[in-house]
Structures are given as structure tokens and as C-alpha cells.
Image: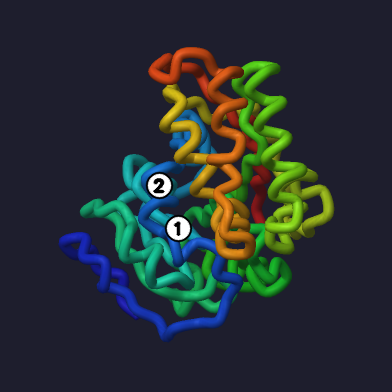
Amino acid sequence: MGLRRDSGARKSLKALPVAFQDHFSGHAAAYADARPGYPDDLFAWLAAQSHGHQLAWDAGCGNGQASVALAGYFDSVVASDPSEAQIASAMANERVRYFVAAAEESGLPGCCADLITVAQAYHWFDTARFCAESRRVLKPGGLIAVWSYAQSEVSPDVDRVFNELHDVRLAQDWPSGRDHVVNRYRDLPFDVDRIATPAFEMRSEWNLHQYLAYLRSWSASQRHLARTGRDAVQEISDEMREAWGEPGLARIVRWPLLVLAGRP
């Protein structure tokens, strides 16, 4: 498979449809609109650790947030996701080419990537198969980095309502694998020679409407609605409004990032 740069068309790479744990395709556009952004210092650090900057592969790319950020540091980025809906909603960038494929069987050439990233998706993968695929796709000395985030942090009062929604109302609706995010990947294998990573966090300045849209974009919120017919976020909205204050007030929302990185 060639990797010539083109005009950034989404269909420059194409794989056959694949079976996968699909938690976001049904609300891909809403999911993309409500995502917090990853910090640029994370991508600057990844670029500094990478021995080359010709090609990065963003596996499980979702709406392409990390893919587009990587394009600021690498000549070319290939970004894959098994969801056609996610790829259709992904951010366009002339250096990023999207394609539909499983992370465990990408179809990419061997020894082609300087960096492989997985943003908030490693817990959905067959990690053993993906690590084997990463070793095949990476150039010698190439870097792989995976990261995730779980609970947001705003204030004690807001966080209390958040935890009521996350841990109680939606307890039955989180898909299998979400527990790995909550326990910060402690139980997931990451078979590489790890390197030390700095502390990173995401930060957004949101009003209440934006924060509630983020909560509603969760797969568990959508599952709960489908299962019960009730909007769990709407049910806690009055309590959240009281904790938040003036709905138009912009507040800082923080998500500490767990970042694992190393070389196979």
C-alpha cells in the first residue's frame, strides 16, 4: 500500500468493514462536537521523543482530534478507526488521511511509522494483537504512546453531582472495558520498554450548556436513554445548575491524562 501524500481526502486509504465494540457510531457527530481537546504540549513532547517525523499512525482515531494535532509535528499522518461514522465525522486536514480499519489489523506497510498513538481507545483493543501489529508497523526505534482520561474536575460541588451521574445513575450503562479507564490502565498489558512521561492534563473553559453536552455525549448516557427512555443528564441538570452557578458562567474543566509511552 502506497503512502503518497494527497490533498487530504478521507478515502485515500480504505480497508474492509470490521467487527468491533461500537459505542459511538450512533452519535458520532454529537460525540465529536462535545470532546475536550488534548493539550499541545503532549504532542510537542511526543515529537521530541520520536526519532523521525515522516509518518505517524493514530489508531482508533475517532473524530481525529489527536490526528490533526499530530499533523503539526509530522510530515504525514494516517488515522484509522473501525467506525465508518467516526471517520465520516473526522476533522479534515491536508496532512491527515483517514481510513476504516481495526487497530489490530491495519493493513499498513511494515516498518513505516515513526510514531503510533492511541487516544482514549486502547481499552477497547485486543491489546496483545494490537501490540503485535504495532511492532510490525513501527520503524526500528519507533515510539508508541497511549493515553486516557476519566473523571473531569471542576469544583467539589460540581464533582459531587458528576460522580452521582457517573457512578450511580449510569452504573449499569458503562460498556465493558470502561473500568480500565477508571483504574488508569493498571490491568492492561503494555508490552514495550517504557519511558518516563511528564504530567499532562486537558483543560477546557465551558459554560453549563457545554458541560452538559459533554456529559450527554458519553456512550453510557446514550445507552441509558435507549435502555430506559430517560435522559439521565436532564435528570441531574437542576442539581448541576445549582452547583455550577450562573449557567452562562465559564468555568475551567480539567481532566488529568494518563500517558503510557515506550519502544517495542
Residue shown at 40% from the left, 81% from the top: 15
**Which quadrant holds the C terminus?**
bottom right
Rendering quarter of residue 131: bottom right
Residue at position x 40%, y 47% from top? 65
Quadrant hosting residue 20? bottom right
* Residue matched to label 2: 65
Name the amino acid type tagged 1: Gly
Which secondary structure, mark 1?
loop
Pointer 2 and pointer 1: residues touching (CB < 8 Å)? Answer: yes
Q: Residues within 10 Å of mark 1 (few under 14, many from 20)?
A: many
Determine if residue 211 is in view: yes
126 on left or right of 60? right
The residue that disc 1 covers is 62
Relative height, residue 31 to residue 246 (above, below): below
Which element is circle 2 on?
Answer: helix
Of 67 and 226, the residue lying toward us: 226
Q: From where the camera sits, is residue 141 visible?
A: no
Q: Residues within 10 Å of mark 2 (few under 14, many from 20)?
A: some
Point 38% across, 42% down: residue: 69
* Percent of width and height locating residue 22: 55, 69
Specify the farthest residue to the bottom: 16
Callout 2 amino acid: Gln
Rounded to the nearest angstrom, the CA distance separating label 2 from label 1 is 8 Å
Which label was assigned to residue 224?
none
Q: Nearer the viewer, residue 196 or 154?
A: 154
165, 85: nearer the viewer:
165
| Residue at (39, 50) in percent of width and height | 32
